[in-house]
Amino acid sequence: MSIIHLKQRLTQFLNPVTLNLQAKHCQFMQRIRDIQPLQLVTCLVAAFSQGNTASIAELLRQFNGMQLCEADFVAYKPFHNQLRKSGFASFMALLTRQAMPLLIKQYQGKIPSKFQRF
């Protein structure tokens, strides 16, 4: 898979309108406020792709680091409250189920047997 194809798939997957609808459907967010689904998902992907994220505080630093100005920074408590919602787990599960078929096509036949059940 080329970088262009991956970019097209991720752009399609990370559509802000679709993410907002999915977040509302999973009852993760009723109103879109300071922490928007696209920003949160992008933050999580960026933070976990580094491989050294061990705390919510590091996720928050990543989230605030991706904001354009300090007025958009979020405090720890509201950020934590979003992550502890039961709808957050449903939202992440839905996104994972949708992302896997998009990204797994490039690895078909190369997956070790112990990972195939995932």
Image (cartoon, helix red, strand yellow):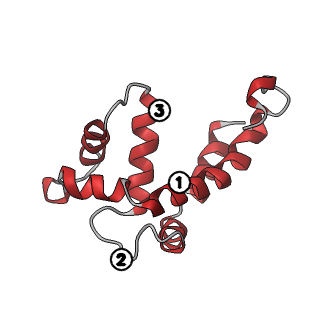
Q: Residue beneath label 3, please? A: 49
Within 10 angstroms of label 1, few (less than 14), some, or many (20 or more) residues?
some
Q: Earlier in the sequence, mark 3 or mark 1?
A: 3
> Picture coordinates of residue 6 (x, y %)?
64, 43
> Picture coordinates of residue 4 (x, y %)?
63, 43
Mark 2–mark 3 distance (CA, rounded to whole Å): 28 Å
Q: Residue beneath label 2, please? A: 31
Mark 3–mark 1 distance (CA, rounded to whole Å): 16 Å
Query: From the viewer's perspective, is residue 16 above or below residue 43?
Result: below
Q: Residue at x 23, y 53 (%)?
A: 68
Query: Nearer the observer, disc 2 or disc 3?
Result: 2
Q: Residue at x 45, y 60 (%)?
A: 86
* Residues marked 3 and 1 touching at CB (< 8 Å): no
Residue at the limit of the structure toward the right, as seen here: 109
At label 2, the amino acid type is: Arg
Q: Is residue 38 left or right of residue 74?
A: right
At label 1, the amino acid type is: Met
Q: Residue at x 61, y 50 (%)?
A: 96
Q: Is residue 114 left or right of residue 65?
A: right
Q: Residue beneath label 1, please? A: 92
Mark 1–mark 2 distance (CA, rounded to whole Å): 18 Å
Quadrant in which residue 118 is drawn: top right
Instruction: Provide the secondary structure element on which disc 3 rests.
Output: helix
Q: Is residue 12 left or right of residue 54?
A: right
